[in-house]
Image (tube, grey):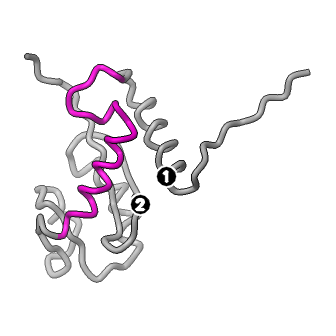
Amino acid sequence: MSAQKNKIWLWTAVDHFKKGILGWVLGDHSAETFAPLWSIVAAWNCYFYVTDGWSVYPGFIPEGDHIVSKTYMTRVEGENTRLRHYLARLHRKTLCYSKSVDMLAHSVRLLLHYLKFGDVPVPTRFIP
């Protein structure tokens, strides 16, 4: 069994009370990857933020606004399950995907569009 060298993480932001993913970013598990997602989330001016306690969060989320709780992570886990249901490439052990980060990003973007709007944007081609 070999360990994957370049793991790619899908970071998501959700509203605990509404279905769907509000923001996301792909990359490693570093603060540099989380920063662009945080710039979106911080603009929402939430009262508090619930996380799983990953070490990068305290560098962004004000101490009084940060709650670490598995109990309140159910919406995130539900969205993760829904993503894995639709995209085989997100299963933990699968051979059903290319290793291209760009293709993963396009797949996630298309799936989230489909889940929100119920269709997949397909460009029409003009054939002379």
Q: Is residue 58 left or right of residue 109?
A: left
Question: Residue 86 at what x, y percent from top left?
Answer: 39, 40
Rendered residue at 26%/41% (across/down): 9
Between the C-alphas of marks 2 and 1, the distance is: 8 Å
Chain-order first, disc 2 or disc 1: 2
Q: Quadrant of residue 100?
A: top left
Rendered residue at 14%/73% (across/down): 67
CA neighbours of label 2 inside 10 A, class few (<14), some (14 to 19), many (20+): some
79 up-or-down from 18: above or below = above
5 up-or-down from 107: above or below = above
Check disc 1 and report its element: helix, strand or loop.
helix
81 up-or-down from 75: above or below = above
Question: Residue 27 at what x, y percent from top left?
Answer: 30, 40
Residue type at tag 2: Gly
Q: Which residue is mark 2?
A: 20
Secondary structure, magenta segment, majority class = helix
Rendered residue at 30%/71% (across/down): 16
Residue closest to the far top: 1
Rendered residue at 11%/68% (across/down): 69
Q: Which residues are magenta?
A: 72-96
Viewport quadrant of the N terminus: top left
> Of residues 69 and 40, which is closer to you in this image?
69
Q: Quadrant of residue 57?
A: bottom left
Q: Which residue is mark 1?
A: 115
Question: Residue 88 at what x, y percent from top left?
Answer: 34, 31
**CB under 8 Å between discs 2 and 1:** yes
Residue type at tag 1: Leu
